[in-house]
Amino acid sequence: MTNTKIEAIGLASRKPFYTVDFPYLWGRLLNTNGVIFGSGLVHFTDWREVRSLDIASGEAGELMWRLEKRVRGLHPVLRDVKVTHRWGGPILMGAEWQLIFAQHPQSADAFVLGAYSGHGVALSVYLGRWAAEVMLGRRELPKWDVAAE
Ligand SMILES: Cc1cc2nc3c(=O)[nH]c(=O)nc-3n(C[C@H](O)[C@H](O)[C@H](O)COP(=O)(O)OP(=O)(O)OC[C@H]3O[C@@H](n4cnc5c(N)ncnc54)[C@H](O)[C@@H]3O)c2cc1C
């Protein structure tokens, strides 16, 4: 996308964004000046369904179609925009909603953090800081991480 178009759609500051209408429509510019847009969740009754999910059909296909329609309606500049890639991915949820915060099993200098269950923006910053303090010997790992015990 040209700089003029980027300016027209309000992304000249290059800040990621999301809309206030539901489901949230979020996006960010790439270094190539392409834009990633995303929105929506597909719900499973069993997580194994992720293995056979086809983003071109069913609930996921419908979400993709609706997302593209919304994007094209955001601004005249986006009306005929070319969509080059479409994809989706799982949100990692640990057993019993337990997140992972543990020393790497093969390295005393590394920690493993994850399974934030969709709350990674806040938790990654909070726990990243905590992990840094553990590395400096100023703090202990949390006791609630059953995986680490
Ligand atoms: C589409 C999407 C929507 C999401 N929505 C939400 C939401 O609504 N709310 C929420 O709370 N969370 C959300 N998340 C999750 C959240 O963004 C992540 O959990 C969080 O950003 C993880 O932070 P992190 O610091 O662990 O990893 P990241 O943010 O991925 O940071 C890792 C960094 O390390 C860099 N890196 C990787 N390898 C190397 C290397 N070898 N050398 C140097 N640098 C390297 C990467 O470039 C990156 O900058 C969403 C995630 C995605 C993908």
Image: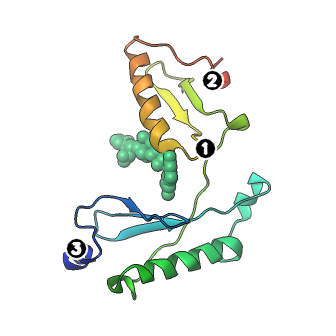
Asked whether 22 or 72 is in front, the reply is 22
Q: Are marks 1 and 2 in contact (CB under 8 Å)?
A: no
Q: Which mark is residue 117?
A: 1
Residue at image location 49% in from the left, 78% down from the top: 70
Query: Tag 2: residue type?
Result: Asp
Number of numbered discs overlaid on the protein picture: 3
Residue at image location 53% in from the left, 75% down from the top: 67
Q: Which mark is residue 91?
A: none
**Residue found farthest to the top:** 137
Q: Say which of marks 2 and 3 sits in front.
A: 3
Asked whether 143 or 108 is in front, the reply is 143
The residue under label 2 is 145
Q: Which mark is residue 7?
A: 3
Q: Earlier in the sequence, mark 2 or mark 3?
A: 3
Residue at image location 32% in from the left, 64% down from the top: 30
Location of residue 92 with respect to 107 vertically, above or below: below
Q: Residue 142 sits in which quadrant?
A: top right
Query: Tag 3: residue type?
Result: Glu
Residue 21 x, y percent position in the rendering: 50, 67
Give the distance between the C-alpha atoms of the residues marked 3 and 1, in whole angstroms: 34 Å
Residue 89 x, y percent position in the rendering: 58, 58
